Image: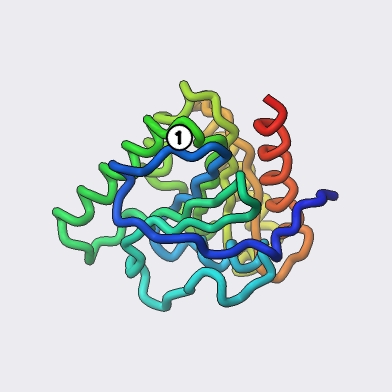
Amino acid sequence: MNNMQFNKTFFLKSIVNSFNLEDFIGIEVALLGYSNSGKSSMINCITNNKKLARVSKLPGRTRTINFFSIVSDFRLLDFPGYGYSKIDHVTKKLLNKSLFFYLKNRKCLRGIVILSDIRVAIKSLDLTILRTLQHKLLPILLVLTKSDKVSKQQLTKKLLYINDILLDLNINVTVCSFSKFIKSDIFFIQNQLYKWYLLYRCM
């Protein structure tokens, strides 16, 4: 159980890239994932606000980094979904460059949440990002979204499969499943974010 009022989260701003991002005296958590992985839906679920993050029916439409303030010194950054084939090459390259610049250089980055559709095997760019982050020793949560779309047996198999891949690659990540229809899944994400907040606030 946590005391953070996620329902008071509000949209702060959008920026087109991270290259000239101002310093922030606080804690940032980055939300990453392929297009249509469910980032906006998860934001709306954990904040209990269906209109906070726009959910588009067209994957790859979001091209900006969207900031959401949970409390004054804790905010979520929703990055554009990566891997969408219909984005032109120049734009895709710029988005990826902006993402990796942020991950490598942002001093107030204190946690990463990577979302992946449970029906799709973990992809190469997810693994590249995970490898990039290992030396930073940041807490990472890999969220397998849309778990209500598969059976319980398939869910168990997928969790074991993903954990085996990460173990073989020596990548230390917490893996969980998520469905917007399961309250315990929502509480788990909220509690993880709250733990990260307390961890770094006390440092």
Residue at mark 1: 130
x, y percentage for residue 98? Answer: 29, 44
Residue count near mark 1 (Cα–Cα under 10 Å), binned few <14, some 14–19, many ≥20: many
Q: Quadrant of residue 27?
A: top right
The total number of labels drawn is 1
141 left or right, relative to 86: right
Residue placed at 54% from the left, 37% from the top?
Answer: 25
Identity of the residue furthest to the top in this view = 135
Q: Position of residue 75 (x, y in %)?
A: 56, 50
Q: What residue is rendered at 74% in x and 48% in y?
A: 191
The three-letter amino acid code for the residue at tag 1 is: Leu
Q: Quadrant of the C terminus?
A: top right
Which secondary structure, mark 1?
Answer: helix
Nearest to the observer: residue 39 or residue 116:
39
Residue found at x 51% / y 69%: 53
Q: Residue 194 appears at what percent x and percent y?
A: 72, 45
Location of residue 22 with respect to 203 vertically, above or below: below
Q: Is residue 25 above or below residue 157?
A: above
The color scheme shown is rainbow
In this rendered view, identify the residue nearer to me: 66 or 134: 66
Front-lying residue, 8 or 146: 8
Q: Residue furthest right?
A: 1
The residue that appears at 30% across and 42% down in the rendered structure is 20
